[in-house]
Amino acid sequence: MSSEIPSFEITKTAILFMDFQVGIVANYPGNDDVIQRAASLLAKARATGISAGFVRVGLEDSDYLTVSDRNRAFASIASTRRLPAGAPESQIISELEPKDGEIQVRKVRHGAMSTTDLHQQLQERGIETVVLCGIATSGVVLSTVRDAADKDYRVIVLQDLCIDPDPEVHRVLTEKVFPKQAWVMDSKEFSELF
């Protein structure tokens, strides 16, 4: 989708699979093709040496207490105690199950970096390029595009591996907003680069 193809080093690249959790994926039925493409990309990344990272939202008892009622999105999660950190619904789906040694973070807000040590883990591995996919385009993906760009990562968004409850919002973000700070392409186009 972006006019120019970014240059990146495989050993300095991480694909971040964000919020592909049992309880979140269940809210988006009919997206088996997205899960299959994500699993295929994960297998190829592992085989070629691209780092894989897994981001999930999961709240501990103390996390629920820190959510202000002013926080429109997370106040409802806190008040209903949804997505408890240890519950099955908060775990990464089996098709994308992380392996030991891969990047894993648990967050308590939308962005993958704002409440985690993800940036530190990426820096320790020498990562310069982050490839983003996840649920939802208007949630974790949007927040992480902005934060990663501000931290000077080369950002690539795989538009066909992002899901949003509103297709028009997904389209506007991937076609008009993200290209200002990221390269946007589909997973097939990306996988042909390595």
Image (cartoon, helix red, strand yellow):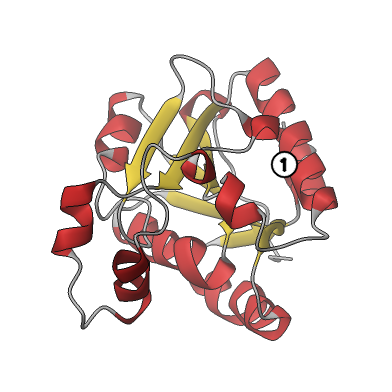
Q: Which residue is mark 1?
A: 38
Locate residue 86, reporting x and y percent. 38, 36
Residue located at (79% from left, 57% from top)? 31
Q: Residue furthest front?
A: 80
Locate residue 109, reporting x and y percent. 32, 60
Locate residue 37, reporting x and y percent. 79, 43
Residue located at (25% from left, 39% from top)? 117
Exactly how many numbered labels are in the figure? 1
Where is the C terminus found, in terms of image quarters? top right
Q: Is residue 117 above or below residue 72?
A: above
Name the element at disc 1: helix
From the viewer's perspective, tell me whether residue 25 is left or right of residue 192.
left
Q: Is residue 184 visible?
A: yes
Q: Amino acid at mark 1?
A: Ala
From the viewer's perspective, tell me whether residue 170 is left or right of residue 140.
right
From the viewer's perspective, tell me whether residue 149 is left or right of residue 14.
left
83 vs 133, nearest the viewer: 83
Residue located at (58% from left, 56% from top)? 24
Q: Is residue 181 visible?
A: no
Q: Is residue 71 above or below residue 86?
A: below
65 vs 19, nearest the viewer: 65
Residue located at (85% from left, 50% from top)? 33
Locate residue 176, reporting x and y percent. 61, 81
Mark 1 closeness class: few <14, some 14–19, many ≥20 residues within 10 Å: many
Displayed quadrant of residue 170: bottom right
Where is the N terminus found, in terms of image quarters? bottom right
